[in-house]
Amino acid sequence: MLRVDFQKIKGFTLIEVLVSTIILAIGLLGLASLQTLALKDNQDAFFFAQAASLAYEMSDRIKANTPTTSPPWQSATIPTPLGAGSCTSTHACNTLSGCTPTVMAQYDYCAWKANVISRIGTTATAVVEASPVTGGVCTGPATRRCITIGWNRNKSLGTSATNTFQLEITP
């Protein structure tokens, strides 16, 4: 008959519990880091969706403001935006008679940039420029416009990278 001496194996169960607790703690730390990465990627996907929506909004503004003669968005130089904070000031587009296509383009650009900053953040960049754009997806002729929206993405260890969304349109 086999006899087990319990005096010799005292504490072996305690070591097993300690090892399994350490393995469980490492697994929980892994789950926490996965959750953190998922939240970062979710925020980045949200910003990408916002940038796409804002780019198409500006595309609609440009296409709506394309008169038959001398469209401001097809000229070689993009209409310069109004000064900072001027989007809500009085301008000629409050009435039907004084709103020229150039003034409307300036107002649209300024209001759109303010909308980009309010929806993506103060570090966001928003540019409408003539194609082709170096290093981007906008490679068409100069009669096209490239809408570029950029935002900062925080990576691990305190570094950051810039993500961009580009849309090329024909006004």
Image (tube, rainbow, N blue to C red):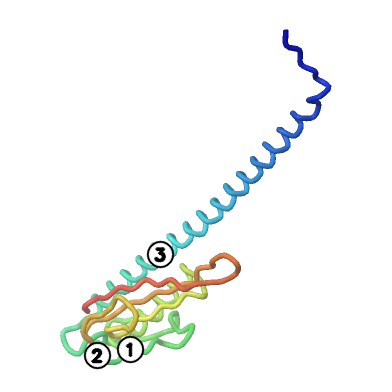
Q: Are marks 1 and 2 in contact (CB under 8 Å)?
A: yes
Side of 47 relative to 106 (left or right)? right
Query: Given this view, does label 3 or label 2 mark the residue nearer the observer?
Result: 3
Residue type pointed to by label 1:
Pro
Residue 97: tell me if it is visible: no
Q: CA distance from mark 1 to mark 2?
A: 9 Å
Residue drawn at (30%, 73%), measured in percent from left and top? Answer: 167
Residue drawn at (44%, 78%), measured in percent from left and top? Answer: 125
Q: Position of residue 95 (x, y in %)?
A: 32, 81
Residue type pointed to by label 2:
Ser
Compare residues 159 and 23 and report the one nearer the observer: 23
- Numbered marks: total: 3
Residue designated by label 2: 75
Quadrant where the C terminus is found in the figure: bottom left
Residue designated by label 3: 48
Compare residues 129 and 70 and report the one nearer the observer: 129
Q: Are marks 3 and 2 in contact (CB under 8 Å)?
A: no
Residue designated by label 1: 79
SS category of the residue bearing label 3: helix
Q: CA distance from mark 3 to mark 2?
A: 29 Å
Compare residues 8 and 85 and report the one nearer the observer: 8
Q: Position of residue 6 (x, y in %)?
A: 80, 19
